[in-house]
Structures are given as structure tokens and as C-alpha cells.
Amino acid sequence: MTISEMQEQIRELKQKTNTAVLAHSYQAREILETADITGDSFQLSVAAKSAEQRNLILCGVKFMAETAKILNPEKHVFLANKNAGCPMAEQLTPETLAAMKKAEPDRAVAAYINTTAELKKLCDVCVTSSGAVQIVQNMEAEKILFIPDRNLGEFIKKQVPEKDIKLIDVGCCPVHNAVTAEDVLKAKANYPDALVLVHPECKPEVLKYADYIGSTTGIMEFAKNSSKNEFIIGTEMSITAHLQYECPEKHFYALSGKILCADMKMTTLPDLLNTLQSVAQNDGKAFEIIMSDEDIKQAGRCIENMLKYSG
């Protein structure tokens, strides 16, 4: 079966099963072409809450599907590939966070959305890379514990110096964190006329060379709207390819071959098709996110606060 034939089946099954497909921007292009909603974690969170379909299929990683379920408890939410996880989301255990909260009960906990539902139950507010600075600024608390990404936390601290923000020693995106200042200097030497656009999950030593720092969507919008024609893209390598498709008159270069997320690459077009077929047949083979009402209520509080403080 060809890619176009699979895509046509997917479109037919979406209609038949009353299903919306939500795909993160890091997914392969053939998946994005069949999705109803595409974007970064924040965009998918907002879209999940307003989706009208009774079934949602998430093409991304597990914490994203959990977030969709938390925001849509009455709907069936499926993850297209059940093995697609996020190393950063699992670096901190609920037990460790509970101990930190007990040691400093006067600190509000702000969690990057790249965390498990179990961690979210213990947090006061969630943030995404696109809205982290605004959300932390809008929080009523002056003392904050930010988990788990230390690099994003350092970026927030510099932007919000008026607040007492504590970071944890462990916790980072291992993919973005692998990039070094040497990698940036090499890329700049190879493409001296290109602007450097970097995700805040990268190390501070990388961010200091950036012409723009922002979320996946922010990077894409900056590149599309810029009058410049050459860009070094400091986030997951798929974004370099997506931008080249969307702006063929411009030139895009990956900052480093290290920025390749294996978990995001797990999901394939056949995974999406198989999930939709399972939903249509109601055979129980699709990987559905199941959460209790109490867990949804507890984890949902920090996500609702994220949406509140983003406004």
C-alpha cells in the first residue's frame, strides 16, 4: 500500500469513527498531512480541549496523550504508538517531588508539560516552552520550584529575575541537551549568513549564540515571517525539513545531527492507520489512555492553571 493510499484510508476512517488526529510538529510529514490539528505541546493542549470529535488519536508521545485525556475526560483518547515515551517526562519520580514539596512547602511547583500525569497531580501549574515565561510571571507565588527541565528553567530565571526560582539538578531533554557551543560555532562557520534559531531546552552555552529563542512553533513562525533567507534550526531535525517544504525559496540547516528524537520517530503512518482501524472495529487493540476521575481531577488542576495564566 502506498503512502497516499494509506492517507486516503485514514481520512475515510476519521469520518467513519468521528475521530480527530492530533499530531505534534516533530512527526513525519506524511502524518502531519492527515492530521486535523498540528502544533507544539501548547497548541495541542488547547486544541484537545476544543475538539468536537468523540475520539482523539495523538501522534506524539505519552504525556501528550495524557494531557488530551485530562482535558477531555468524556472522550476516548488513543496514542498511535504505545511505546512512544519521553525520557524527560520520566526523569523525576512523584516520590522525589513529594519530598521536595515537604522540604519547602512555601514554594509553588511549576512543571514543564513534559511530565507524567502522576507528577502533574503534585504541581500547581503547567508550562510549555511557548508560554513558560508569561505563565511564571503571572503566577501569584514569588517562590517557585520549576521541574524538570533545568535548561528551560535557566531561561525562565533570566527572563523573570524578580521571582525566586529553584531548579533541580537532574532533568533535561537529552536530545536538545546534547548540543554544545562547539556545534553552534561549527554551524555558524559553515553558514555565516544564517540566523540561529534555538529551542530553550538547549543549554545556556548554546542559547547565547541564538538570534531567536523560542518554542517549536515560535521558531517556525519566526523563520516563515523573517525577511532573511538562511536559518540554522536548533530543535528537532524534522522541523528543518518541514520548514524547507513550506518555504522552498529559503534555506534551512540543522544545527546538529544530535537533535533527533527517537521517541517522536517511533510513530509511523501505519501506526495511525492501524489505530483507526482498531477504533472502527472496537476490537480493543488500540492503546487507549485510561485514567480515573480522581486522577484526572488532580492532574487537571495544573493544566487548567496553565490555560488561565496564559490568557
Image: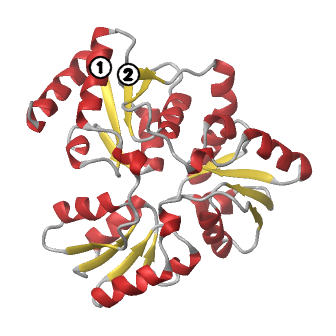
Helix, strand or loop at mark 2: strand
Tell me the residue at 73%/60% (across/down). 168
Label 1: which secondary element: loop
Task: Out of 307 and 182, give the one closest to the viewer.
Answer: 182
Q: Mark 1 near mark 2, Cβ–Cβ under 8 Å?
A: yes
274 or 58: nearer the viewer: 274
Q: Quadrant of residue 53?
A: top left
Q: Is residue 77 left or right of residue 125?
A: left
Residue positioned 29% across, 77% down in the render:
231
195 or 186: nearer the eye? 186
Q: Residues within 10 Å of mark 2 (few under 14, many from 20)?
A: many
Mark 1 is surrounded, within 10 Å at the Cα level, by few (under 14), some (14 to 19) or many (20 or more) other residues, namely some
**If the image is split into quadrants, where does the N terminus sit?**
top left
| Image coords of residue 161 (percent x, y) | 72, 75
Q: Looking at the picture, does residue 177 appear above or below residue 49?
A: below
184, above or below 77, in the image: below
In percent of width and height, residue 173 lies at: 54, 58
x and y percentages locating residue 75 in the rendered image: 46, 20
User: What residue is shown with label 1?
Assistant: 18
- Amino acid type assigned to the residue bearing label 1 in the image: Asn
Residue behind mark 2: 55
